[in-house]
Amino acid sequence: MDLSKLKADLKKDFNSSSSSVDLQNLKVKYLGKKGKITNLSKKLSTFERKDRPKVGKKINELKLLFNELNDKTSLKIEKKELEIEISKEQVDVSLPVDTSQRGGLHPITRTIEKISSYFLTKGYLIEDGPEIESEYYNFDALNIPQDHPARDMHDTFYLSTGDLLRTHTSPVQIHALEKYEMPLKILCPGKVYRSDSDPTHTPMFHQIEGLVIDKNVNFGNLKKELVDFLNYFFGKDLKVRFRPSYFPFTEPSAEVDIMDQKGWLEIMGCGMVHPNVLKMSGIDYKKYSGFAFGLGIERMAKLDYSISDMRILFENDLKAISGKK
Amino acid sequence: MKFLKSHLLEKVPMKIDTRKLETELTRLGLEVDSVKKFKNKADFVLDLDLTPNRGDCFSVLGIARELAAAENKKIKQEIVDLKKTDLKPKTRVKLSAQGACPRYSFIEIYNFDNSKKIPNFILDRLEAGGINSINPVVDILNYVMLDFGQPMHAFDLDKIGKVIDVRYAKDKEKVKLLDESTKVLNKNCLVISDENQALAFAGIMGGLNSSVTNETNSIFIESAFFTPDVIRGKARNFNIQTDSSQRFERGVDFNIQIQALKKVTNLIIKYLSGSYSVISTVEQKKHIPDQRKITLNSSNLRTKLGYEIKSNKIKKVLKSLDLKVESLKNNFLSVEVSSHRFDLKIEEDLIEEIARIEGYDNIPSIDLKTTNQQYRNSKYLQSLQLKKYLANQGYQEVINYSFINKQILDDLDIIHETIKIKNPLNENLEVMRPSLMPSLITNLKSNLNRGETFIKIFEEGKVFKLDSAKSETNMFSGLIFDHDKKKNWNDKAIFDFFDLKKLIIDMLGYLSATNIKFIKSKNVFLHPNISLDVVVKGKIIGSFGRVHPKINKNFGIKKTFFYFEFLTESLFFESDIKINESSKYPSIQRDLSFLIPGKIDFDKLYELAKKLGGSNLVNFKLFDLYQESEKNQDSSYAFNFTWQSKKKTLEDKEIDLIVSDIIKGFQKKFNAKLRS
């Protein structure tokens, strides 16, 4: 047997193989039970003893060569075969998919979340309160006695049960003062109701109320807390103005304005909790002080989503509230 | 409160740009709502949006005081003096109502000419103030009110009796007012009457019968101090709002009555001529408010505001506000409140005054150092998580009014006693919703009208019931309508009951719910045969299914749709998920197909398979189902079973035994035939 011919055949065979089936066949042809290299090994004993190591070495070299060529060729073939397979798998990826059912949260929920997530990181507790309230919680306990002119500002809905629909989220302050030990730090988002309807007012709307009670809480703290929040909400350093105002349940009281393109824009109300409010809820007002603030969610949503008519928010036209075109 | 810029600056002589004036007043807490040019003159009308505590600023004098304090100017004092007269008034006044009218001053003016012209500056100031011109006398009275803040009323002297009585009305006593309306009063209403009848609704509006006309030539003028509490709320209760009631209910300076009368009389005599009586005053001295004294501790001021203001500065500010200040020991000041400041009652009120005049802008921003609330499991966050889950499943959140039209409840066949609104905005908003269904079905209809064919919505909100102990409950409900015939090319399936069932089970799983059971639902909104209730620990926490056909009919919705509702708070589960290691041993699978006659609930088949499958049965799947719609036809079920042990490799032999038990069991219990 001519070893060098075998070597040349081997190289030729691998060069001309083009599929994994070809490779399989070559394995049989050379290394199978009756393969050419196998046969050669079987014949080793027919050589003279002194030649055997030399021939054995040659056979080994052939085996190594086979493996080397096999590895190299199979890599090439696998790559080629994968390319063929890929070229057969054609999909028109420009075909449309259904995106009509993108769900979403209501703009009011999104605005409440944006505000709440800030105050949650500041350690506020999110509180919920009843929407049906008594005169006591909605007015009296907030230092708004019967016939007080401030009640005129709250076009109240009265119920057949003798109660009323809360006109602001401030009653939650009173429930919290009664329920928890001081110090206290709460935030209350919720629905409120006033008998009013026009493009800028809906008979139901949302407010967020904040209340902080501790020892040594001052007006400077209130300013810092709210300015920080407003900068967060609008994502920039705002020009903020605190101007004196009046709420029966805070003293001193302030309205907070921010400067936008058109000038000063009223954004929220706040103040130091009135001692009468603390007194009525049984809090030692000499030991504790605090501040409260409240803001209208619709107003914030309006700024964030450029809504022109507030009533759209509660008509629930799916295209409108999902913001889809 | 509207007034002319020139009128204000007459009292505080200074030059100030209108824009600057606007900013200054707003900075003081007197919010300027608008500034408009007055006619073609070089003057401006300022409209202030006053807070209810500042009754004193319902006069140009009051606003002038504020401006002077802030600008460090002096008010031009007006000396009003009346020449002496010997004429005694013909009318006598008595104050029968105790405490309601602590001070009542009056004067009579005779033989003036009410057809003469009064000067334009008065008419302009009234017009700018939004006060209609009536006749010269009334105009002069209104002008002095605008100027000093004291509402006054003139009675035609020829139309009233000899004795004027300030008394409470009799029950159901009638009075015909200037606006020609007749009010039926009650015992809490204060009236001005003569011997015969009520002449005026005190402090609110005069009566028609005794009113001053163009022909009137002699009058009785009332300039009184009414206790704010007595006037408060009355105008609102009787649905009238007047310049007078607005001022009296907020509090009028209790020392200005005579001044105002003098000014009025001078103007009448000057422009309309005539003669006058002396001014008489009747008082209930003990009911006249005290000149209140408040103690101010300047260290409290620092605690409240967060910064120090020097005591000299404090005194200066308080004095600029017409308050008398006296230094006491240590850091204490005694402050006497002037008679026009009804709003100053406690130390905090004074602190606000100082902060206000100093400017809120000068208060420094200081970091808040407080104890954070301890972590409490927040319902807010849990409900937000739930909303986000549904939003990610393609559901749009909606928010509806809590009040609805009553008719819709009849259409839904709801029999709850509802909570009604006594003063609804309109009939569509007259009852509190006892369920979220009325709102969602309204949304469905309006969106169908807009041409939508695939609607998936949900809402979280309170529902209100009269007949339950807790009148308001948070609910979480959703509605799905899918009759989209033109779905995207790769999606042909229409939403059905089992899509809803999957949604609910996945949602409950996401919320870590355990021990959930489903039972046939009795929810009145749902189709009795295509619905389920969700039960946790023996309590129904929600329902879902196809909406009852009667609702389709009542609402004119021809096509089927689906609904679910849950008690929001029952959806918040304590998570008790434990992470278990999975089995290291191989699993064995077998498929079995049965023909089963009649209609048998899958639940029953599942129970038996589970029982016979033993503890190593880890998965049981129905992978094919063929059901005939007719009753007694066979149904064909194909099940896939998977067994796996955590302790050992299972052998075919033991599984074969179990499989043969299952086949026998199905044959015996369901008359099932094994298909080859």
Image (tube, grey):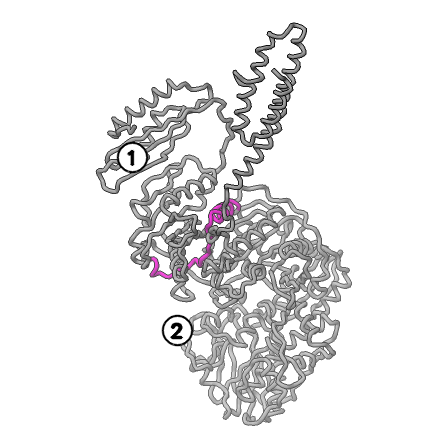
Query: In the image, residue B412 lies at what x, y percent?
Result: 32, 55
Q: Residue at x 60, y 56 (%)?
A: A293
Let me know if residue A44 appears in the view. yes
Q: How many marks?
A: 2
Q: Label 2, on which residue?
A: B172
The three-letter code of the residue at mark 2 reads Lys
Counting other residues with Cα less than 10 Å from the Cα at mark 2, is it few (<14), some (14-19), or many (20 or more)? Answer: few
Q: Residue at x 42, y 20 (%)?
A: B650
Image quarter hosting the N terminus of chain A:
top right
- Please check whether the numbered discs 2 and 1 fall on a single chain: yes
Q: Label 1, on which residue?
A: B636
Whether pointer 2 and pointer 1 mark residues with C-beta atoms closer than 8 Å, the reply is: no
The numbered mark 1 sits on a residue in which chain?
B
Q: Residue at x 44, y 59 (%)?
A: B401
Is A61 displayed left or right of B504 in the figure? right
Instruction: Magenta stretch: give its range.
Output: B381-410
Q: Nearer the viewer, residue A189 or A211?
A: A189
Query: In the image, residue A109 lies at what x, y percent?
Result: 52, 53
Marks 2 and 1 sit apart, C-alpha to C-alpha, by 83 Å
Image quarter of residue B631: top left
Residue B392 among magenta residues: yes
